[in-house]
Image: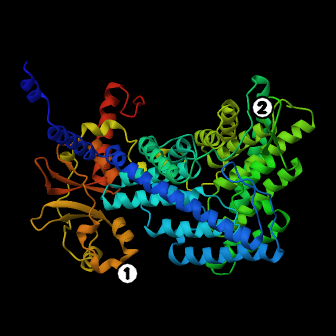
Amino acid sequence: MTEPAAAASRPSASSTLTAAMRRLAALWATPGVGRAGICSPLVGVVAGLGAVVFLLSLQFMYQHVLLGLMHFALPPTLEGEKHAVAYPWPWWMVVLIPTLGGLFSGWLVFTFAPEAEGHGTDAMIRSFHKGGGWIRTRVPFIKTVASIVTIGTGGSAGQEGPIAQIGAGFGSYLARVLRLPASERRILMLAGAAGGVGAIFRAPLGGALFAGEVLYSSTAFESAALLPCLASAIVAYSTFALFVTPHPVFAMPALTFQGLTDLPLYVGLTFLCTAVGWLYTRTFYGARDHFFHKLPIPRKLKPALGGAMLGFLALAFPQVMAGGYGWVQWGAIGEPSDLLSSGESAFVPNMSAWLLLAVALAKIVATSFTISSGGSGGVFGPSMLIGGMLGGAYGQALHGLGFGEAIPPSAFVLVGMGGFFAGVSKTPLTSIVMVSEMTGSYSLLVPLMLACGLNVALSRRWTMYEEQVATPIDSPAHQGDFVVDVLSSLKVGAAGVRTVGIVPIPAALPFEQLVHKVARSSEGLFPVVDAKGRLIGVFTLRDLRLALLGSESWGPLVIADDLATRPVTTVTVHDDLHTALRRMTELNTDEIPVVEPDDPTKLVGLLSRRSLTSSYTTLIESLRAGSAHSGAPTADGHPAA
């Protein structure tokens, strides 16, 4: 072959680009992970930038409020510059500043976004299971500011709740802009949370696992979200690293696991973490349900009361204020000091076993004052401090009794952090990986696995995240996913497609007229059609209710086309009922549009979940009746009577 002929046979750059764009378009048109996977890196960029803004804002508050007004110099973590620890004074400022922080936070949250109160991770879990991945646009902003003020004025709260809502909120917003269905909106919401958590804690793999694992109180995992969460966490962490040089949060000595003889000592620590974890959850929700909720004062004033109560507690235990990672490093692990003869740094804890235990218990009360009163912040940071303090106290006590002297106390600190959080959050994989990433050490992986797995097994009856469900089958987000595949033998056309009573909505219909038209209808699903009557989208009553939340400001600008979900999830009369049920679940409604096989814009009618279930029941009964005569097993696997 001559050179010109060979050159002619090679694809041109334009044809290669065209082919690549076609592949991308084909992937985009694939429901599920395709679109979410493409969008998740963009969500990661925003989550990473949000983590940077959140961290720098928090450091500003520490510098100008805690240090500037209260003269309170928190001990640094590995990332901070070394400085002397200074305790807060004067006493009235220790009480006043958290009170004012709670007052501002309560006013902001309960005035503009009441759903942003408390720890934001629960709000994200609730949105996944019950809200179709929908988070109001204003919520992440309100949550961010309220949390910065709460933590920056000394409130006992963590960073994972607000940063998870920043990322999750943008993921939800992007999915709405692109008009993705609820199933993909939920995935993008989780991807945003994964990116934010992975960046702020310098633990990208831990953040990716956290978003999929925290949804359930068992060992279940949202596997469909794994790849988008990984992509988001990678990009978020890399974006964060452009502005903040990432280091492990904690400095640790060289730790080693010495074999089977060490395990009983870590089992004892696990039992201690389980008992204190039970106390933590009971105190946290007991303070909310039996004290703060029953107070006859406005809700927006309760965080101020919680701040004042925290301030009085901090007069005795200033270590309970703010996040507290520095206290774990300084008090329980110790700061790197002079080199030993082996060339390694010596780590000497600065707090006694009794003080570490007292601070751990006081932190439980302080966190209940701050968050259970309606203050804004997460529970991950306080949980890490409690677990670390318990581990440090346990290790020092063992050494005092002559046990485990070959294991440094910092080893128990590391395992205590992971084991304690795994028990109260039901996230064993996340805890193992995140603690290893935050400490820069995987050398104690086996004790971590033991502590996290055993604590989750012992503490199945309580959790800090009350919106968790046991398994995917208990989640409304997965309703219909576990129906027996006998539906695959039935066709949509045989199930009874409804063709009367349908209320098509013109795409150009103004929002006010749309509301009146829907109010006069008894329908739950509304097809949106263009001027030629072609189906271009659908919306549900749930979508309309969410849109009404902000209708006072932008209602006159909205038309029916703005509410329509695209691409339209439909079936044809030739599709089987198993396919229809899965697509109905994606649409998160009780009906689905049925279109012509050759024209997906021509609406034939609507298939309801009731008709689908009736067809399923009829088939099951007929199978049972037939097998009763032959003695064969029925469709559910049981022998006929």
Q: Circle 1 is placed at which residue position?
A: 552
Q: Which mark is residue 387?
A: none
Residue 212 falls left or right of residue 478: right
Residue 236 falls left or right of residue 528: right
- Taking depth in this image into account, of 440 and 386 the one nearest to the observer is 440
24 over 113 or under it: above or below: above
Residue 408 falls left or right of residue 237: right
294 over 275 or under it: above or below: below
Q: Amino acid at mark 1?
A: Glu
- Quarter placement of the N terminus: top left
- Quarter placement of the C terminus: top left
Name which residue lies at 76% across and 61% down: 320
Could you say whether the residue bearing mark 2 is in a helix, strand or loop? loop
Percent x, y for residue 134? Answer: 42, 61
Which residue is most to the top?
1
Percent x, y for residue 570? Answer: 23, 51
Name which residue lies at 54% across and 66% down: 144
For marks 1 and 2 on the same chain, the one whose residue lies earlier in the sequence = 2
Q: Is residue 455 visible?
A: yes
Percent x, y for residue 84? Answer: 80, 57
- Taking depth in this image into account, of 444 and 135 the one nearest to the observer is 444
Q: Amino acid at mark 2?
A: Gly
Q: Quadrant of residue 281?
A: bottom right
Q: Which mark is residue 343?
A: 2
Name which residue lies at 86% across and 53% down: 355
Of labels 1 and 2, the one closer to you: 2
Q: Is residue 291 visible?
A: no
Which residue is most to the front?
3
Could you say whether the residue bearing mark 1 is in a helix, strand or loop? helix
Percent x, y for residue 91? Answer: 83, 74
Residue 313 falls left or right of residue 178: right
